Amino acid sequence: MTRSTLFTLITAFILFSTHIHTISALFDGPPVVLIPGDGGCQLQATLNRTATLHPYICQKTSGLFTLWLNLDEFVPYYFDCFIDNMKLVYDPATRTSRDSEGVHVYIPGFGNTSTVEWLDPSKSSFGSYYTHLVDALVAVGYERNVNIRGAPYDFRKAPNEGGSYFWQLQHLVEETYQKNGHEPVVLVSHSLGCLYALYFLNQQPTSWKNRFIRAWVPISGPYAGTTKVMRVVTSGDNLNEYVISALTARNAQRSYPSSVFLFPNTDYWSPEEIIITTPKANYTTRNYTQLFKDLNYTIGLDLLQDTQGLVKDIKAPDVPVFPVYGVEVPTEANYTYPGNSFPDTQPTISMGLGDGTVNLRSLRAYRKWRNEQYSPVREYEVKGPTGEHSAILAEKSVFRFIINEVLFPFIKLNSTTSKKRSKLSPRKSPKLT
Ligand SMILES: *[C@@H]1O[C@H](CO)[C@@H](O)[C@H](O)[C@H]1NC(C)=O
Ligand SMILES: *[C@@H]1O[C@H](CO)[C@@H](O)[C@H](O)[C@H]1NC(C)=O
Ligand SMILES: *[C@@H]1O[C@H](CO)[C@@H](O)[C@H](O)[C@H]1NC(C)=O
Ligand SMILES: *[C@@H]1O[C@H](CO)[C@@H](O)[C@H](O)[C@H]1NC(C)=O
Ligand SMILES: *[C@@H]1O[C@H](CO)[C@@H](O)[C@H](O)[C@H]1NC(C)=O
Ligand SMILES: *[C@@H]1O[C@H](CO)[C@@H](O)[C@H](O)[C@H]1NC(C)=O
Ligand SMILES: *[C@@H]1O[C@H](CO)[C@@H](O)[C@H](O)[C@H]1NC(C)=O
C-alpha cells in the first residue's frame, strides 16, 4: 500500500468513524481467541438410530440439528432422548470415547465467535455466553471473526482426546496473528477451557509462545478441580432445572471424561478432609477408586487413569497471565448421605468458599506461578454475586480489567511515562468506562 492510499484511507476512516466507533484507524489492540468452558459452545448432531428410548417421542432420527443448547429438550421424556444422544461410549481398547451408536456430534463454527457467543442458535438470552465480552470488545474497535475468534471443542471430553483440537487451535492462533499485522494473540478461556488452555500452553515450545501469545486471561479456572463433580458423578446434577431428572442426567455425566478430569487434585485437599460421608464409608480425595467401585462406575476407573495426570502439576504456562475469578459465592464443599440415600438421592451439601461451582483453593492454585515463571501473573478478583462462575462472563468490571489492563495496558500511564513506554509497545484505545 502506498503512503497516499494509506493517508486517504485514514482520512476517510477518521471522517466517517465518528458515526461508527470512537476509535481511529490506528487501532492496534492484540487479537483475541476465545476458548469456552464446559457446556460453553454449541453442539450439533445427526442421528441415524435404529433403537430409541421412546420411539414416539425421540422421533427425530435424521438430519442435522442442534443438540446443545436446545431448550425444547429440557422437558420430561424429551430430556431422556437428549441425554441418550449426549452420552459417550468408552472404548477400553483404545482408551477413547465416542458418540453413541447412530449419533454423530459436530462442533460447529470453529474460528467464528458466534457458536461461543450464543449456545442457542436462536440467541435466546438464556443461552448467552461470551457475547457480552465480545460486545464490549467490539465497542472499543474489535471486529468479530477478524481480531476476535472462537475455538470451541467437545467439552464432554478431556484434553487427552483433544489431539486434533490442539492442532486446530495452534493454527487458529497462527492465522489470527498473521492476519492482524503479526500481533501476538491474547487467549481468553473460561472454566474447563482454562485447563484445556493450560494443557495446550504446557505442550507448546517457549519460542512458539514468545512469538504468538501476548497473554492469557483464564476466567473461573478450576486448576485443581472441584468437589462439585464428585456429587455430579455420584448422584447426577439436573442443571437447576427441577423438571428434569438428576439420575437421567447422571447417565451422560458419568460417561464424560471431562467429569472425572475435574475431580479434586489430591495436592490441594488433605487426606483428612472427608468429601462424601455415608453411614458405611467416608470418602476423601484419596478414595476415588473405592468410590467408583462402590458406585459400580467401572469406566470411572479407566477415565481416572486417562485424565488424572494431564494437568496434575498445574505447571506454569510461561506467558503473562491475568486470572479472573469470583471469590464470594457459596460453593459446595462436602456431602452427607443419610440412611440409604447413597448414591441415588441428592445429599445434604455443606457450603464453603469459591465462585459457586469451583472451590476457592482451586481458583487460586495459579498463585504458585508467581514463583515459577518470569512473566507477570496479575489477577482480578470479583467480589459479590456477579463473580459467580458463569455470571462473571457478563460482569462489566471484568471487561474493564481485560480492556484496560490486558489489551491496552499502556494507555493509563501519564504522558511522560507513556512516551518512554510507547517505544516498547505503542497501543492506542479509548478506555471503557
Ligand atoms: C443408517 O444406518 C443404516 C444401518 O444402521 C444404514 O444402512 C444407513 O445407510 C444409514 N443411513 C445414513 C443416512 O447414514
Ligand atoms: C460466523 O457465523 C455466522 C452465523 O452462523 C455466519 O453468518 C458467518 O458467516 C460466520 N462467519 C465466518 C467468518 O465464518
Ligand atoms: C466417618 O468419619 C467420622 C468423623 O471422622 C467418624 O465419626 C465416622 O465413624 C466415620 N465413618 C465411617 C463409616 O468410617
Ligand atoms: C480412604 O483412603 C484412606 C487412605 O488411603 C484409607 O485409610 C481409607 O480406608 C479409605 N477409605 C475408604 C472408604 O476406602
Ligand atoms: C453394584 O452392584 C452390586 C452387584 O451387582 C449391587 O449389589 C450393588 O447394589 C450395586 N451398587 C450400586 C450403588 O448400584
Ligand atoms: C465440610 O465443609 C465445611 C465448609 O467448608 C467445613 O466447615 C466442614 O468441616 C467440612 N466437613 C468435613 C467433614 O470435612
Ligand atoms: C500521573 O501523575 C500525577 C502527578 O505526577 C500523579 O498524581 C498520578 O498518580 C499519575 N497517574 C498515574 C496513573 O500514574
Image: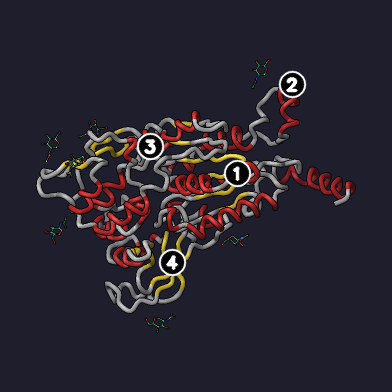
Residue at left offset 59%, top offset 32% = 405
Identified by mark 3, the residue type is Ser
Q: Which residue is mark 1?
A: 209
Of the image marks 2 and 4, the number of the one nearer the N terminus: 4
Which mark is nearer the camera, 4 or 3? 3
* Image height of 66 relative to 406, above or below: below
Asked if marks 4 and 1 touch (Cβ < 8 Å), the reply is no
Badge nearest the viewer, 1 or 3: 1
Q: Which residue is mark 3?
A: 362
Quadrant of ligand 2: it is bottom right
Indicate the position of residue 80 as horizontal and vertical percent values: 29, 65
Q: What is the CA distance from the residue labelled 4 to the residue labelled 1?
A: 32 Å
Task: Give 93 or 71, whichever is nearer the viewer.
Answer: 93
Q: Which mark is residue 416?
A: 2
Residue 178 position in % (x across, y down): 69, 51
Which of the two marks, 2 or 3, is nearer to us in this view?
A: 3
Badge 1 element: helix
Of all residues, the one furthest to the right in this rendering is 4
Q: Earlier in the sequence, mark 4 or mark 1?
A: 4
In this rendering, position of residue 192 left or right of residue 130: left
Task: Check disc 2 and report its element: helix, strand or loop.
Answer: helix
Q: Is residue 79 left or right of residue 130?
A: left
Query: What amino acid is at disc 2?
Result: Thr
**Looking at the image, can residue 244 be seen?**
no
Return the residue at label 4: 105
How crowded pointer 3 is (Cα within 10 Å; few <14, some 14-19, many 20+) is rated as many
Marks 2 and 1, how far apart at CA:
31 Å
Q: Nearer the viewer, residue 2 or 10?
A: 2
Viewer-proximal residue among 371 and 357: 371
Earlier along the polypeptide chain: callout 2 or callout 1? 1
